[in-house]
């Protein structure tokens, strides 16, 4: 089942940066890693998927609904973290999620405790967020993205600020939700090694374009790590652009 369809999407800014003719789709249970250098268009693409930026051309459909024409239907089953892990720092983690839960009238009362347990914040749920580390705030953002029981979760640098133990726990949570509940993840990150441990598919972006796309198991030559492969592909693309 195809959940997300991106077709020839372009968004260019006055400085020439942006996204150019990007196309791919995601199926149920995919963990898709969007990889590329900073400034290469990853966050711009995620913002277009979430309807925060309108593309210059191309189309984006989620669960068969156009993001630009049927926005509410398109994002009804989508959770996301983009750029920053925002929360009210004078409130507790529980109260922050309780505030968010008002937007989901059919949400079970136990769901807040479930997601806090899922991301490892249950022991600290009554503490004010101002006392949280960056990694704890990142976990709270993940809990917020999962709160509504979404079928598609979009995460921009979800392990930013986490220690090694936190990274392992987040990876485990994502893998568990994808395999056990069929939740689809689109994850943007510059931590290639981290993504390589959970993603079944990847897309490599450079200078606003998607230069490689496919199953991780099919893209990597024998004894080549994902990090080595990505670095090689990006350097090859840069050399080609310089030559052109």
Image: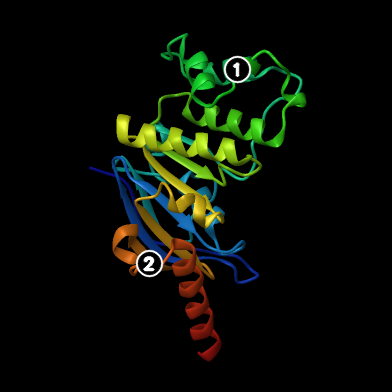
| Mark toward the viewer: 2 or 1 | 2
Q: 126 or 87, which lies in front?
A: 126
In the image, residue 235 sits, relative to residue 44, either above or below, namely: below
Pointers 2 and 1 in contact (C-beta within 8 Å): no
What residue did someone put label 1 on? Answer: 99
In the image, residue 172 sits, relative to residue 131, either above or below, namely: below
Q: Position of residue 197 (x, y in %)?
A: 43, 49
Q: Position of residue 48 (x, y in %)?
A: 49, 51
Q: Residue at x 53, y 18 (%)?
A: 101
The local crowd at label 1, few if under 14, some if 14 to 19, many if 20 or more residues have their Cα within 10 Å, is: few
Looking at this view, name the residue that lies furthest to the top: 109
Asked if residue 73 shows in the view, the reply is no
Looking at this view, name the residue that lies furthest to the front: 223
The local crowd at label 2, few if under 14, some if 14 to 19, many if 20 or more residues have their Cα within 10 Å, is: few
Disc ID at residue 211: none
Q: Position of residue 244 (x, y in %)?
A: 50, 90
Q: Total of numbered circles in the picture?
A: 2
Q: Residue at x 39, y 38 (%)?
A: 175
Q: 104 or 124, which lies in front?
A: 124
Q: Is residue 86 left or right of residue 212?
A: right
Q: In the rendered image, which quarter is residue 151 located in?
A: top left
Q: Position of residue 26 (x, y in %)?
A: 32, 49
Colour scheme of the picture: rainbow
Disc ID at residue 223: 2
Q: 103 or 121, which lies in front?
A: 121
In the image, residue 64 sits, relative to residue 105, either above or below, namely: below
Q: In the rendered image, which quarter is residue 163 located in?
A: top right
Label 2, secondary structure: give it.
loop
The quadrant of the rendering that contains the N terminus is: top left
Asked if residue 163 shows in the view, the reply is yes
Please tell me which of labels 2 and 1 falls first in the chain. Answer: 1
């Amino acid at each position: 089942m195809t959940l997300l369809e991106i077709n020839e999407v372009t968004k260019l800014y006055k400085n020439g940066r942006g996204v150019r003719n990007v196309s791919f789709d995601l199926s149920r249970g995919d963990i898709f890693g969007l990889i590329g250098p900073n400034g290469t268009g990853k966050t711009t693409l995620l913002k277009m998927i979430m309807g925060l930026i309108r593309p210059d051309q191309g189309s984006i459909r989620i669960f068969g609904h156009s993001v630009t024409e049927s926005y509410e239907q398109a994002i009804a089953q989508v959770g996301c973290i983009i750029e920053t892990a925002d929360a009210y720092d004078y409130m507790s983690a529980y109260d922050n999620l309780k505030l968010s839960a008002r937007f989901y009238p059919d949400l079970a009362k136990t769901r807040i405790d479930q997601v806090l347990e899922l991301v490892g914040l249950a022991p600290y749920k009554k503490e004010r967020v101002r006392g949280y580390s960056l990694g704890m705030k990142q976990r709270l953002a993940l809990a917020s993205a999962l709160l509504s029981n979404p079928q598609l979760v979009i995460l921009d640098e979800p392990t930013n600020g986490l220690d090694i133990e936190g990274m392992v726990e987040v990876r485990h949570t994502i893998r568990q939700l994808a395999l056990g509940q069929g939740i689809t993840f689109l994850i943007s990150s510059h931590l290639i090694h981290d993504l390589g441990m959970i993603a079944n598919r990847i897309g490599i972006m450079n200078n606003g374009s998607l230069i490689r796309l496919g199953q991780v198991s099919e893209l990597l030559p024998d004894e080549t790590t994902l990090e080595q492969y990505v670095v090689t592909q990006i350097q090859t693309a840069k050399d080609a652009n310089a030559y052109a």
